[in-house]
Image (cartoon, rainbow, N blue to C red):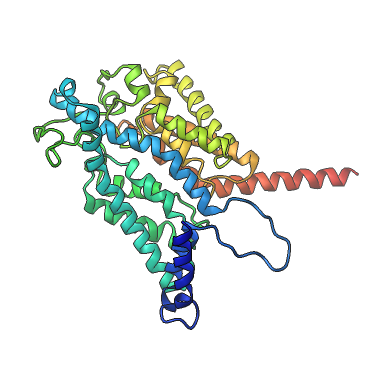
Amino acid sequence: MNALKKYFESIRPQFEKGGKLHALWSIYDGFSSFLFVPNTTSKSGVSIHDAIDSKRIMTLVVLAVIPAMLFGMYNVGYQNALAAGKLAETGFWAMFFFGFLAVLPKILVSYIVGLGIEFAWAQWKHEEIQEGFLVSGILIPLIIPVNTPLWMLVIAVAFAVIFAKEIFGGTGMNIFNVAIAVRMFLFFSYPGSMTGDKCWIYQSNIFGLGYDLPDTFTQATPLGAIAQGITPHFSMADMFWGFIPGSIGETSVVAIALGGILLLVTGIASWKTMSSVFIGGIAMSLIFTATGQSPIVWYEQLIMGGFMFGAVFMATDPVTSARTETGKWIYGFFIGAMAIIVRVMNPGYPEGMMLAIFFGNMIAPLIDYFVVDANISKRAKRSARK
């Protein structure tokens, strides 16, 4: 790393003002600050010194997502082998590498398109390259079905980065989570590729790995089956460990929980937001079960679909969630409750978590406004009594 750092320092003058590559300063600065902690310090004024900056935070979030991503790759191969009736004769690594090859293009497209737009935007605005897409780029492939066409992903990522992020001012200014914006754009623009029973199982071999399935093969997710009035044939253990059809990274409770623990231990995710999402989901599930409107018990609601993934990685986004301490409880409860309401009340949209987070992002500033306003009123009344 020292040799690499010396190399970056040696070419730095070419990118500084007056250098022949000055126009590309934002690109140089982006790579340099990503690889190394910046050595600049404040010269005046009051500053808070910390060992971590936003890029390190983003890196920790990516590390937290890795268990879900790796399991998702394996599950892609597992579901393909299971559908082909070849599970017993297919080894672990064969299934994993098949899934790796199926998921890798989506990760590459997500980063190439998203970062490409961010680099171009920074050059156009003569600003530093922002690091927010480091997390969004890995989340996007994990919340879509494995059969999502790459051209759809290109359009959705471009739309989300431009219209859900950059026009609001970039990282830290966007009101909607970029990954959620991608998912919502895909769902409402191409619903046939985002839901139903034809988009969850990869149906062809890749470089000799995996199996070719009939074009007519279909397989619904547990929530999709329930929406159709069919009892899912998956066991509780399958749903808990993640051996079920679903979006690439959302199926395994265990893998998602490992990432959640890392986010909570490092203090990156708010435990108030995360726990209140589960409280809201459990409360609404109990109400629907008690009134006979849903056959799904509360713990099944939590381990099916994208509830766990949304609660751990999406609802806790510090930029688009509520920022006041009381607001975090309200915001999380709203998302958890809304996700179950959408699932139960709208059979045409069996998975409600992403829509609930989208609405949560929309009202988060309003929640914070009323919380702050209530605190101001309370203090004003207290002062008036003195």
Q: Residue furthest bottom?
A: 18
**Of the pair 107 and 121, the residue shown nearer to us:** 107
Q: Is residue 173 left or right of residue 289?
A: right
- At 46% across and 51% down in the image, what residue appears? 176
Q: Is residue 298 above or below residue 213?
A: above
182 left or right, relative to 101: right
The C terminus, quarter of image: top right
Where is residue 260 drawn, in percent x and y?
49, 34
Residue occupying the point 61% across, 47% down? 368
Is residue 36 or residue 87 the one in the foreground? 36
For the image, the number of numbered tags is 0
Any part of residue 118 in sight: yes
Residue 55, position as x, y percentages in the image: 51, 53
Q: What percent of the width, then of the height, locates residue 202?
A: 19, 36
Q: In front: 251, or 262?
A: 262
Question: What x and y, as percent, mark residue 319?
Answer: 53, 50
Left or right: where does residue 322 sit relative to residue 6?
right
380 or 48: nearer the viewer:
48
39 vs 240, left or right, is right
Outermost residue toward the right? Answer: 386
- Residue at position x 37%, y 47% in the image: 138
